[in-house]
Amino acid sequence: MESHLPILLIVLPLLAAPLCVLIGNRKLAYIVALTVSWCVFAMAVALVGTVNADGPLRYNIGDWAPPYGIEYVVDELSGFVMLFVSALGAIVLTYAPRSIDKEIPGSKHYLFYATYLLCLTGLLGMCVTGDLFNVFVFLEISSLSTYALISLGRSRRAPLAAFQYLILGSVGATFILIGIGLVYQMTGTLNMADIATRLPVDHGPRTVLVAFAFLTIGLFIKMAVFPVHTWLPNAYTYAPSVVTCFIAATATKVSVYALIRIVFSIFTREFAFEVLPLDTALMVMALVGIFAASTAAIYQDNVKRLLAYSSIAQIGYMLLGISMANQAGLTAGIVHMFNHALIKGGLFMVVGCFALRIGSVQLTDWRGAGRTMPWTSFAWAIGGLALIGVPFTAGFISKWLLLTAAFDSHHWSVAVLMLLSSLLALLYVWRVVETLYFAEPSEKAKQAIEAPLGMLIPMYTVILATLVFGVWTVYSADLAAGAASLLLGGMQ
């Protein structure tokens, strides 16, 4: 049974999704979706335990050996990402019922659960597959599901936001598919390990460069890297709160994982960072994105949009770590994927609680809500501290590792700019704290009551995790360091 866990991780939610549609009852569909999501998390825990004990786990679908068959591979990196994606998928679904009752028409609830499971399937599939075309297939399963989930929002702008994402997402997907086609043309295989041995990256044809460009640019769009980020603010703003919680915590992180896997495992560090100046390009894009998006966040009155721009900035920190192309930098980038998933997932859960009780995500309507919704407001304060990077929070671990990597690489100016960017995060987080605690209560805030326990408990599970992983780093930093070492072939 244990040897089949990699395929069961994918098959279980994939089969449960149409089952939710066939059931057609929102309560039964929720029970199915919730049970499946927690089972998937349990399987992810078991897989990570096996990998830590015995090394990478490989599963040949249909017992066809690679490169002829499709291979699923769970190693330190894929297991790390798979574990937090499945955990957040289960926790967000536990949090979901009261929020979707408010924000999604009851007749569409069973469709929401089915689409949510499909999205989870796609994200987990991207983590475990060892086949490059399969990465594209699972990427599109998650993307198409996300378009549908965003369009479920009650606002008339939700379908438009989903359509904008669809257009840009399709451009990104086309770029990725062209890149995969060119790689297949040169190697005659789609197995990623096999491609790595066959791809002529040393003085090879120009086709290698073109394939690399198509793949990276396509993934930049999916990651919402500045300046190809324009789909993200509207998608996060107008999607139902539960959808925003889930995709903000997982979708862009899995795309970052795909970029790391393709750059380091297929094209190699030497090709990307020595033959090509990818390090300089990523560093410039990351720093410009961090400052541009953080500045935009300061001026937002819609809290969802504020956090959306913040997410674009945080993607920049992940790129910074990758751009250093060494053990310390890559470890920092991988750790920040996990830490930011917790922080932003928790903060969007806070927004969902305010949206339920106040009926608005506009900052002006939140004035004085700290008095009527103290637990929810306190959760924002904790999550905000983690986002800034205050000591004893997960955000501090990420930024400390990035600063250390910058100093080790002699990027003194990058370290200074990182510290300055944290001040921008302080400004937009403080705007919300000031509104909650130091402003006269608005009419909506006066009438609000605390969020229900069914939402507070999952929310605090994630928010308090940002404190736990700010002190205990065995899971985050140690696993990330092992993954980085594997990607770099043991190079420090």
Image: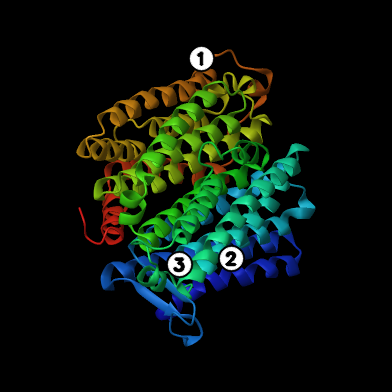
Give neighbour class at mark 1: few <14, some 14-19, many 20+ (Cα, 10 Å): some
Disc 3, SS: helix
Sooner in the amino-acid sequence: mark 3 or mark 2: 3
Query: What's under tag 2, amino acid-wise?
Result: Val
Q: Residue at 56%, 63% (x, y): give it.
A: 136
Sooner in the amino-acid sequence: mark 3 or mark 1: 3
In contact (CB < 8 Å): disc 1 and disc 2: no
Q: Residue at 40%, 80% (x, y): give it.
A: 3
Give neighbour class at mark 2: few <14, some 14-19, many 20+ (Cα, 10 Å): some
Image side of residue 437 versus residue 17, left or right: left
Which callout, 1 or 2, points to the residue nearer the camera?
A: 2
Q: Quadrant of residue 448?
A: top right
- Looking at the rendered structure, which numbered label has been put on residue 128? 3
- Looking at the rendered structure, which numbered label has been put on residue 471? none
Residue 283: where, in percent of width, then height? 38, 38
Sooner in the amino-acid sequence: mark 1 or mark 2: 2
Q: Nearer the viewer, residue 20 or 265?
A: 265
Q: Nearer the viewer, residue 390 or 131?
A: 131
Q: Which residue is mark 1?
A: 438
Disc 2, SS: helix
Q: Quadrant of residue 314?
A: top left
| Residue, far bottom | 63
Q: Nearer the viewer, residue 452 or 243?
A: 243
Residue 38: where, in percent of width, then height? 51, 62
Q: For the residues marked 1 and 2, what is the alpha-carbon distance in whole angstroms?
A: 49 Å
Query: What's under tag 1, amino acid-wise?
Result: Phe
Q: For the residues marked 3 and 2, what is the alpha-carbon distance in whole angstroms?
A: 13 Å
